[in-house]
Image: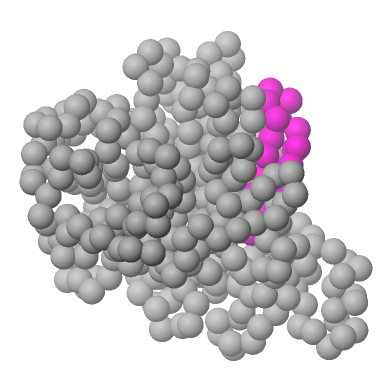
């Protein structure tokens, strides 16, 4: 694999080169500083992430208008617990709140609220091309799930524990454990002298981040009915065949990655702690866009990177840069960039462009939030 690295400092700062953007953002917490403190403490362990169940944070959904390199309009549409995944396609908006999914449609004044025993720390939600299916990453239990719509019946799932990725670790003791949701398998393994963690209801007994096996934090549709999954703990993105449930590795050797997806007939992933966005071409070339030398980080995290995720947008890429608390827009072809600072207290989790004709649905979302529901 040939690697070609592009230092983003060498891209021209040209806000005028970018069009107007309307975005919806999910904020998992309005206290980013607390999240940073927990992360800095976790670096002392072999596996980062929370060790014990933390209290859920109040987050929300944000509407932004960006033009001429600056935020022209900013609005918190509403507050909801642990808002993470979001997708907006063809008059349908979906976002996740911890262990639930909210689906808004033009014909309904209130959203459908979807819940399931195996929903846990939902990190991403993605519509397929015709909105007939919704794919989600149930990160708390290393599972990808697909719902048929509008019935929201579960039609497919892929549990990493059933495919060789079932070994977690207690970061306090360093002791390994095997994860399962099968009572029978738990008994067999325990009789073999294995250290087993049986997870029957993750809502009642959630797995802290550090104790998960793979930590699938994003799931995206690929071509030909396949799925792209990003694994935080193992540092790779996989392609899963929905027919056979077999998987293959697409990109490996990453540090706490997020957001593996298709990008202009190639694959893109955010190397979160590595401070890079990687585009892998079918010609065995990796184009690497390096953030590490950019200024703008607080002194206490000057040696750390945290690029939350990236998306293709218009003719380029937008990356949520958590340690510089802003959005980096860049277009690789023209080698231009634009950085838009955000509120330093916002822990931005995901974003999606707002289609031009969706003002009615946006108003509906705002009205629902301002009514009886406030998290």
Q: Residue at x 46, y 83 (%)?
A: 45
| Residue 289: % across, % down | 25, 56
- Residue 372 seen anywhere in this rendered image of the structure: no
The residue at the far front in this view is 283
Q: Quadrant of residue 71?
A: top left
Q: Residue at x 59, y 49 (%)?
A: 137
| Residue 76: % across, % down | 34, 33
Q: Quadrant of residue 44?
A: bottom left
Q: Is residue 365 above or below residue 306?
A: above
Q: Nearer the viewer, residue 263 or 151?
A: 263
Q: Is residue 111 above or below residue 124?
A: above
Q: Is residue 317 left or right of residue 238?
A: left
Residue 286 magenta: no
Q: Main secondary structure of the magenta part?
A: strand
- Residue 354 seen anywhere in this rendered image of the structure: yes
In the image, the segment drawn in magenta is 140-157
**On-image quarter of the N terminus:** bottom left
Q: Residue at x 35, y 70 (%)?
A: 37
Q: Is residue 252 above or below residue 227?
A: below
Q: Nearer the viewer, residue 181 or 286?
A: 286
Q: Is residue 258 above or below residue 174?
A: above
Q: Is residue 366 left or right of residue 170?
A: left
| Residue 357: % across, % down | 38, 13
Residue 141 magenta: yes
Q: Residue at x 59, y 45 (%)?
A: 227
């Amino acid at each position: 694999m040939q690697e070609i690295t592009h230092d983003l400092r060498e891209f021209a700062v040209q806000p005028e080169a970018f069009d107007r953007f309307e975005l919806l953002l999910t904020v998992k917490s309005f206290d980013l500083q607390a999240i940073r403190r927990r992360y800095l403490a976790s670096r002392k362990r072999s596996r980062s992430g929370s060790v014990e169940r933390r209290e859920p944070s109040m987050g929300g959904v944000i509407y932004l208008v960006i033009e001429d390199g600056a935020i022209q309009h900013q609005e918190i549409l509403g507050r909801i617990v642990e808002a993470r995944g979001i997708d907006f396609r063809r008059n349908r908006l979906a976002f996740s709140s911890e262990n639930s999914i909210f689906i808004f449609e033009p014909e309904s004044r209130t959203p459908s609220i979807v819940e399931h025993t195996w929903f846990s720390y939902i990190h991403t939600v993605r519509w397929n091309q015709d909105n007939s299916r919704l794919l989600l990453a149930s990160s708390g239990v290393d599972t990808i799930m697909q719902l048929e719509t509008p019935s929201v019946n579960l039609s497919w799932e892929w549990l990493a524990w059933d495919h060789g990725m079932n070994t977690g670790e207690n970061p306090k003791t360093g002791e390994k454990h095997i994860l399962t949701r099968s009572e029978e398998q738990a008994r067999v393994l325990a009789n073999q002298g294995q250290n087993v963690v049986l997870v029957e209801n993750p809502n009642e007994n959630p797995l802290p981040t550090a104790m998960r096996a793979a930590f699938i934090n994003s799931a995206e549709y690929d071509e030909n009915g396949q799925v792209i999954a990003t694994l935080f703990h193992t540092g790779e993105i996989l392609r899963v065949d929905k027919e056979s449930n077999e998987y293959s590795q697409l990109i490996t050797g990453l540090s706490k990655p997020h957001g593996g997806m298709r990008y202009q007939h190639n694959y893109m992933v955010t190397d979160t702690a590595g401070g890079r966005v990687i585009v892998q071409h079918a010609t065995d070339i990796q184009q690497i866009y390096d953030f590490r030398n950019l200024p703008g980080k607080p002194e206490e995290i000057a040696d750390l990177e945290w690029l939350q995720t990236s998306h293709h947008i218009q003719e380029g890429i937008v990356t949520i840069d958590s340690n510089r608390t802003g959005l980096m827009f860049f277009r690789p072809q023209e080698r231009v960039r634009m950085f838009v600072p955000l509120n330093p207290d916002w822990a931005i989790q995901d974003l999606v462009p707002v289609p031009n004709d969706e003002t009615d649905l946006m108003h509906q979302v705002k009205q629902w939030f301002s009514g009886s529901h406030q998290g």
